C-alpha cells in the first residue's frame, strides 16, 4: 500500500503543536499565561483531537490491510489480528497509566486516572474495534451521538463532581479532568478518523491515477471543504462564544470543521497536486515517523526551566530548542530508523505476546 503523505504531515503537525504548546505551558510566567490559554483552546484541531483523528486513520488502514492479508493467508486470520490489536491497546493503556503516575509525582497532574491524550487514545482504540466493520455513515452518525451525549452527561453529572456516591465516582471516571481529552467527547475524533482511513484505503485500490485523484477530490476535498465550513459556522454561532472552550459541544464542532478543511488541503497538495519535497523525511514528517516517541520524550523538557519567561523572551528559548530537537530526531532516524520508534516496539511486543498466547492455546489442545 502506498504511504499517504497527507496523513504523515497531519500527524507531524499534531506532534509538533503539542511539543511547542507544552513548552509554552511549562515555561511561560504566570503573568503571561494567557498566551498558553490561546494556544490551548484554538490549537485543539491539531492537538489531542487531531492526534485521535489520525490514530483512527491508522487503525482503519491497519484493519483493512489485515482483512486482505487474512483472505490471502492460511496462517493469518482476523482473530489473530484482533488479538494483536487488543494487546497493542493494552500496552498503550499501561504506558498511559505509568505516564499519569509520573506526571502526578513530578508535574502536578491530578491523579493516575486522567484523560490525558495517551489514555484517551488507548481506550478509544479499544472502543473502536467493533465499529471497524460497520458502515461509514453509521460511524459518522455515532460520532454525533457521542458528542451530543457527552454534553448531556456532563451537565447531568457536574453537580455530583465532588460527592462520594456512585454518580460522583462516575463523574470522576468520565471527566477527570474536564479540560482534558475526556473519553465521551474525544472518542468520536478517533471514530471519525476511521472513516477517513476507509476512504484512503479504498482510494489506494484504484489503479488509475486520474480516477484515484478524482475519487479523493470528491470524497475528501469537496466534502471536507463543504462540511468543514458548515461545522465551523455552526460551532461559532451555537452558544457563542463556547467554541473557544475546548470542552464544549460547540468547540468540538468547530474543531472538526477545521480538521476537515485541513485534511482537504493536505490531500489536495500531497495526493492530488503531489507537491513533493527534496528529501524524504523533512520536519513534520520526522515528527510523524517518531510521533509516539517524541510525544513521550519531550515530556523530559519540562524539567529544563521553571515558569519564568515572559511573552517576549520565551521565543529565544523555545525556537532554538525546537530546532535542536528536530535535528536530534533526524540524527536518530538516520542512525536507528524504526528501531528507535516506540510505536514500532509496541507493535513488535504485541505480535510476540500474541504468538505466545497462540502457543499456550495449542499446548492446551
Image: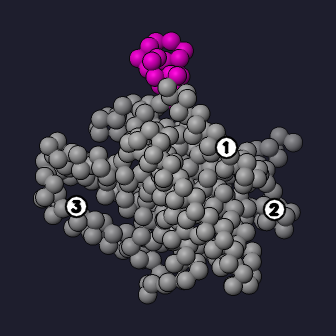
Residue at the spot of label 1: 142
> What range is drawn magenta here?
156-174
Residue at the spot of label 3: 318
* Depicted 82 relative to depicted 108: above or below: below
**The residue positioned farthest toward the front in the image shown:** 237
Q: Is residue 20 among what the camera can see? A: yes
Sequence-earlier tag: 3 or 1: 1
Residue nearest the viewer, comparing 301 with 364: 301
Element marked by disc 2: helix
Which percent across, then down, holds residue 57?
61, 59
**Label 2 crowd (10 A; few <14 / some 14-19 / many >=20):** some
- State the quadrant of the C terminus: top right
Q: Which mark is residue 10?
A: none
Mark 3 or mark 1, which is nearer to you?
1
Residue at the spot of label 2: 70
Residue nearest the viewer, comparing 192 with 25: 192
Sequence-earlier tag: 2 or 3: 2
Amino acid at each position: 500500500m502506498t504511504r499517504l503523505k497527507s496523513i504523515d504531515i497531519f500527524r507531524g503537525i499534531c506532534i509538533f503543536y503539542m511539543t511547542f504548546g507544552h513548552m509554552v505551558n511549562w515555561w511561560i510566567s504566570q503573568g503571561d499565561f494567557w498566551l498558553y490559554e490561546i494556544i490551548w483552546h484554538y490549537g485543539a484541531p491539531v492537538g489531542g483531537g487531531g492526534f485521535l483523528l489520525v490514530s483512527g486513520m491508522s487503525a482503519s488502514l491497519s484493519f483493512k490491510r489485515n482483512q486482505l492479508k487474512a483472505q490471502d493467508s492460511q496462517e493469518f486470520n482476523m482473530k489473530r489480528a484482533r488479538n494483536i490489536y487488543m494487546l497493542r491497546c493494552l500496552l498503550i493503556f499501561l504506558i498511559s497509566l505509568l505516564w499519569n503516575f509520573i506526571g502526578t509525582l513530578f508535574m502536578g497532574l491530578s491523579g493516575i486516572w486522567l484523560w490525558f491524550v495517551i489514555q484517551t487514545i488507548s481506550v478509544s482504540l479499544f472502543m473502536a474495534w467493533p465499529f471497524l466493520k460497520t458502515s461509514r455513515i453509521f460511524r459518522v452518525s455515532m460520532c454525533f451521538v457521542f458528542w451530543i451525549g457527552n454534553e448531556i452527561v456532563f451537565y447531568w453529572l457536574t453537580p455530583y463532581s465532588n460527592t462520594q456516591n456512585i454518580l460522583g465516582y462516575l463523574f470522576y471516571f468520565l471527566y477527570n479532568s474536564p479540560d482534558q481529552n475526556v473519553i465521551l467527547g474525544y472518542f468520536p475524533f478517533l471514530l471519525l478518523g476511521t472513516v477517513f482511513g476507509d476512504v484512503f484505503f479504498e482510494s489506494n485500490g484504484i489503479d488509475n491515477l486520474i480516477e484515484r485523484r478524482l475519487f479523493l477530490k470528491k470524497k475528501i476535498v469537496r466534502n471536507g471543504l463543504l462540511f468543514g465550513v458548515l461545522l465551523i459556522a455552526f460551532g461559532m454561532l451555537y452558544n457563542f462564544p463556547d467554541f473557544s472552550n475546548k470542552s464544549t459541544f460547540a468547540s468540538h464542532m468547530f474543531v472538526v470543521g477545521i480538521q476537515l478543511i485541513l485534511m482537504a488541503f493536505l490531500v489536495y497538495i500531497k495526493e492530488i497536486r503531489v507537491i513533493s519535497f527534496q528529501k524524504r523525511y523533512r520536519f513534520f514528517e520526522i515528527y510523524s515517523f517518531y510521533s509516539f516517541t517524541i510525544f513521550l520524550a519531550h515530556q523530559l523538557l519540562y524539567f529544563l526551566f521553571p515558569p519564568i519567561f515572559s511573552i517576549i523572551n520565551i521565543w529565544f528559548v523555545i525556537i532554538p530548542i525546537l530546532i535542536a530537537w528536530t535535528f536530534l530526531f533526524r540524527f536518530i532516524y538516520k542512525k536507528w530508523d524504526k528501531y528507535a520508534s516506540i510505536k514500532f516496539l509496541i507493535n513488535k511486543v504485541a505480535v510476540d505476546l500474541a504468538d505466545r498466547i497462540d502457543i499456550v492455546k495449542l499446548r492446551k489442545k
